[in-house]
Image: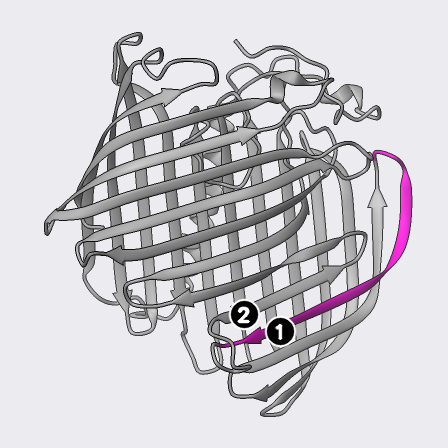
Amino acid sequence: MEPQVTHPFRSQHARSRRSTAGRTRRFPARAASRFTSLAVLCLLAAAGTPHGAVAGPVSVNPGLDLEVRQDQLPNTNSSDEGWIARLSPRLALARMGVGNSLEIMGVRSFDSNQRVSGPVWVGDEAAMRFIASPAPHSYLSANAGYVSSRDPLENKAAIPVTFSESAISTGGANLELWRLETRYDVRSHTYESPGHLDGLSQNWEATAIPFRRPDTQGTLGARGRDVRIDHGPVLNTTALTAGMRRTHFAGLSSEIEVGAAATRDPVHTTNSWDLAVVAGATAERGALRQPFDLRFRFMRDVATTGFAEASVPARRRRFAVRWEQDLGAEGGRFHDATLSKYLTFEARDTVMSAYVLTVEGSFGQTRSFFQNSSWLRTNRVWASLSRSVLPWLWAGLDYSFVNQDGDPSAPSWEFQRNRVGLRLTMGAQ
């Protein structure tokens, strides 16, 4: 049972219509309907391409993960939790065409241990991606994702630990034409617990290119952000900008836009105007004599958001690090828009020609955007060492760790857990 606390991030302006009465068990149907909507978007995008754009045979790749693990909580022995067995069947479908692809993946996980007769459902994961280039100077992509879990260590998303079953649905679409570029992204975080509020954030962007030369583009842009908590709007931003993109030389390009942004805060009944700035650059490996690919893009309106990332892709190894700041709706015990900062990293390499070593992690901070409250810090680390036993069978040793700091007024948010597991993966990787 989750302890009931009064969290400092809770807004004093929460409205009565956000009452949590009658919220019990409404989570699964709502989460499923949102993911279904995202899936339909991708299918409609696929259906809208010219006939034969995604021609080719359908690839069906079933698989199965078998895992035995042990969790350890602070001030306990590793044997106190006992061994837990996990069964995760999965299915991946793909259809490839010339410059086009449609991919669908789904995983469902079940646990069994000495205290609970299993198998018992613990989580679902699904993803869909569609890419098409139906004509010269045109590009269309759409994606959808869904993750639902009761396991705080299973979810690799850079989010705070929720202590109860929750689901994250994401989706997006991107269209690039000769004179127009558009993008739309949506993220929904829903909770089963009646003490938590659902969060929904949407971002859209449209850029017209009235002036175009081989190395220079003049742009007119419009972008917006809509943040909602339990269906109620808490923040809305619209910005208009004008700027330029330039390719300086092969491998190096940049962009700059300047304009104005209007922000409406229905909760605190305030409106504001801010300077809107967009700045970004992409430098491929070696363009500036650097040994890695570098990319960043920052946007300034009512808040500064954006990302900076560096990566070293290779055939048998990968190293990547990314810093990002986002203004959205985490929901849960946050009753207002949230500001999040995350540093994530990934390292993958082949060791001794036969073993694959992977290390991933995220170090994040989240707080209410409108209140000057303390940051909620959540750190996660995953590591695995795996080897191919047969062409269709992999064996691995996994380790995961999560630590979340609370504060004196909300000690129940403190959380720490270690996990060690042995894994067998059957099917295509």
> What residue is drawn where x is 31% and y is 7%?
115
| Residue under numbered circle 1 | 281
Viewed as shown, does residue 309 lie left or right of 67? right
Viewed as shown, does residue 123 lie left or right of 198? left
Residue 213: where, in percent of width, then height?
62, 92
> What residue is drawn where x is 51% and y is 76%?
290
Count of numbered tags: 2
Q: For the residue marked with disc 2, what is the amino acid?
A: Leu
Determine whether 63 is above or below 317 in the image.
above
| Residue under numbered circle 2 | 294
Determine whether 107 is above or below 358 in the image.
above
Image quadrant assignment for residue 256 = bottom right
Tell me, yes or no, whether the two marked residues, 2 and 1, touch with CB atoms within 8 Å: yes
Looking at this view, is 343 or 275 the one in front? Answer: 343
Mark found first going from the N terminus, 2 or 1: 1
Give the residues drawn in magenta, as a range. Answer: 267-284
- Say which element carries label 2: strand
Please, which residue is most extreme toward the left here?
A: 390
Q: Which mark is residue 424?
A: none
Colouring used for the render: one colour
The answer to whether residue 224 is visible is yes
Looking at this view, is 29 or 353 the one in front? Answer: 353
> What residue is drawn where x is 36% and y is 22%?
71
Whether the magenta-drawn stretch holds residue 280 is answered as: yes
Q: For the residue marked with disc 1, what is the amino acid?
A: Ala
Whether the magenta-drawn stretch holds residue 71 is answered as: no
Residue 19: where, in percent of width, then height?
71, 17
- Say which element carries label 1: strand
